[in-house]
Every structure is written in C-alpha cells, then in structure tokens.
Image (cartoon, rainbow, N blue to C red):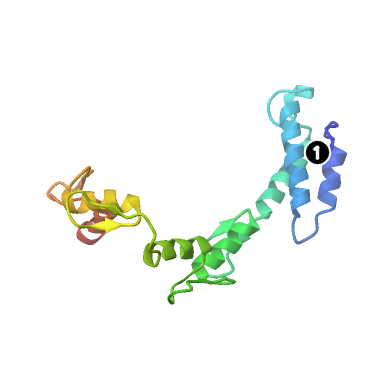
Amino acid sequence: MDNSKVTVARIKSVFDGIDDKGPNNEQLGKVKFMKLSLLKEGREGGRGDKGGFLHMHERTVVQQQKAVIDAARHDCPFEDCTFTSHRLNDTKVHTEFVHNIGVTWHRCLVCSYRAKRKCDVTQHVVMKHATDTLWHRCKQCDFKTKKKSNIKQHSADKHDVGVTWHACTELVCEYRAKRESNLKRHRAAAHG
C-alpha cells in the first residue's frame, strides 16, 4: 500500500471487499496500515482539526476496523476446548499438539520412540542411543548424564548444592520443596 493520505473512501473500499467469511490476510494488513496512518495523522482520538475528534462517519469506520480485526479469531474446533487465536497457524499447531489432529509423527530409527517434533526425536537419539556423546559427571557421586543441565538439577536434588527452597505460606505448615512444582502440588493436596 502506498504512503498517500488515508481517506474515508480508501478505508471503505477495503471493507466493501470483505465477505461473510471475514477478512483475508491482505485485507487485515491494509486495515492495520490504515489504522496506524490515522494514529500518525492524529485523526483517531486525540486532538486534530474540527474540534479534535473524528467525524461521525470516520469514527464508524474505525469501529468497523476494530470489529474486523476482532472477527478474525480462530477457535479450536473442539467444543470443550476454549483455545482461541488471531492467527490460524496457532490454532493448527494447538490442534496438533493438544488434540493430536493432523500430526506428522517422527519415529526413532533404533527403537519404538515417536514424537510430534523432529527435534525431539533427535534429542532422544542423542540421549538414549548415541555412544560418541560427551558425558557430564557429578563431582560428588557416580551419576552421569549427556545433558549438562541435568547435572545442576541432580546436584540440587541429591546433594543440596545451589538449592532454592520454596516454603509453604500456610501458617502452621512447615513444608518446603526444592522445586516450585512440588510446592504447588503440595498446596493443592494439603490446603485445597
């Protein structure tokens, strides 16, 4: 879209091309561009010519713009799921990962492991099957792992090294945990 001045007629022309299915990506882009142009010109809200506010017709067009952007929502097709997004691809990824719809499964060539993401299979192969991988060893015991971050977690869990304790906030409860997730589980089970 060129940088010429945004007019009511130009905005109306975008809305006239929108059918009952809602705007396409090109139309949404034009609407967002025009909205930014109106903001830069001081014609939406704020002070400008003719008393500082949009004319009634221009105000209606801006309201239509907002309605078009809000209408471009994509809801999860499952009735009991409340997921919604303004991007269709987010909804597609959601249905793949949460509801297993349209999933391309990636399989390990060595065992029966499978995953939705290829990178997860690659990590699985390195962790479970690779023999030429560098091992990270605990300095205090015989524990070893192929993933460096596991050493830090092991040291905290088994040897109390670098531990951040998470204490229960209930008055009479003395529970504390090394992991915040364990504290959340405790609060749900013990204190409702």
Residue 10 coordinates in the image, percent (x, y): 86, 40
- 183 to the left or right of 174: right
Rendered-image quadrant of the C terminus: bottom left
Q: Amino acid at mark 1?
A: His
Give coordinates of residue 150: x percent, y percent.
Answer: 31, 53
Task: Tell me how many marks there are.
Answer: 1
Q: Nearer the viewer, residue 106 or 15?
A: 106
Q: What residue is rendered at 68% in x and 54% in y?
A: 71
Q: Residue at (73%, 45%) from the top-left corner?
A: 65
Residue 176, relative to residue 131: is it above or below?
above
Depth check, front residue: 144 or 38: 144
Q: Residue furthest front?
A: 132
The image position of residue 42, as x and y in percent, is 73, 26
Residue pictured at 73% horizontal, 28% vertical: 40
Which residue, given by chain and number where applicable, does mark 1 sit on?
A: 57
Image quarter where the N terminus lies is: top right
Q: Residue furthest bottom?
A: 112
- Between 166 and 168, which is closer to the camera in this rendering? 166
Residue 125 in sight:
yes
